[in-house]
Image (cartoon, rainbow, N blue to C red):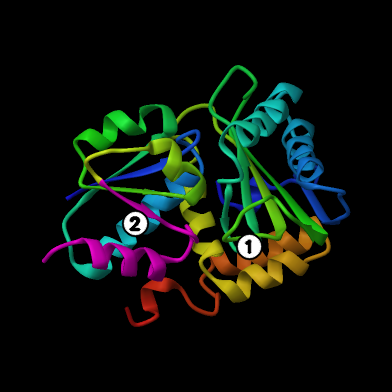
Amino acid sequence: MTLAEQLPDAAVATRATVRDWREAVQLAGRGLVDQGATTERYTDEMLQALDDHGPYIVIAPGFALAHSRPSEAVLRAGLSWVSLAEPVEFGSEANDPVSLVIGLAAPDHQSHLEVMAELAGVLADDAVLAELMSADSAADVRSILNRVAHGDAASTPEDSGM
Amino acid sequence: MKIVAVCGMGIGTSVLLKMNAEKALRAMDVDGDVEAADIGTARGAARTADIVLTSAELAEEVGEVSAKVIVINNFTDVNEITEKLDQSIER
């Protein structure tokens, strides 16, 4: 399954307004629950992970990958997408403030690897990422992702001459 | 060369980091295994590893290990990972 196929309308909130990082993660959790990937409990687990380990999920400038571990709260693998109208601070020294939160649920350690590889490619491309962050509908997000998946992205790390 | 990519849960950020570390090794033409681990198993995995890659937040939780701990700020930036690995790998 491609990244775009993993993002039904119920999984996507664009240009959302939130008060703080907690609300942003709750919205990412909502997208997972609404598409039937997780129960509400998974959202609490994602928040707990942040309380326990700090904002380590903010892994790139402006980007957080909200997730917890495989558990009974995960019904199937799923992704959700929350882009923010105004970025919020997560407390990450290197990568605050955050404009895009992707929620991830996985029932095991393998089933989501293909989609993670696609995600890694998307996140590595600053131009695509900027475009995705300003997309204002689920259909827009999917069409950008589909275009990138078909190889029309500006550049990839592999061909940047390293 | 054994590298462990560490995140809190072992399914998300460490998987992205593992994928990009593998790209970095290929770019450097270095043979190596990269394994993703959660913070609970990281100390055990680090015992047999040469290098641990993780975030600033989790580096403290990993604590003292024999492997060299490298903090990566941007997990999606293969260039940063390549540069930091390059400084640590003796060739």
Which one is in front in this view, the residue at disc 1 or the one at disc 2? 2
Q: Vertically, is B76 above or below A6?
A: below
Residue B36 position (above or below residue A135): above
Residue B57 shows which numbered tag?
none
Dot 2 corresponds to which residue? B21
Q: Identify the element where label 2 is drawn.
A: helix
- Does A34 lie within the magenta span? no
Q: Residue at x 22, y 40 (%)?
A: B66
Asked if residue A113 shows in the view, the reply is no
The picture quadrant where one finds residue A86 is: bottom right
Name which residue lies at 45% across and 51% down.
Answer: B16
Tell me where residue A73 appears, x and y as whole percent. 65, 21
Q: What residue do we see at 47% from left, 35% from top?
A: A111
Q: Which element is circle 1 on?
A: helix
Q: Quadrant of the C terminus of chain A?
A: bottom left
Place of residue A10 in the rendered image (x, y in percent of width and height, measured from the top left): 80, 42
Check residue B88 for magenta coloring: yes
Q: Amino acid at mark 2?
A: Ala
Which label was assigned to residue A145?
Answer: 1
Give whichever of B56, B86 is nearer the camera.
B56
The stretch of residues the image draws in magenta is B68-91
Q: Quadrant of residue A103?
A: top right
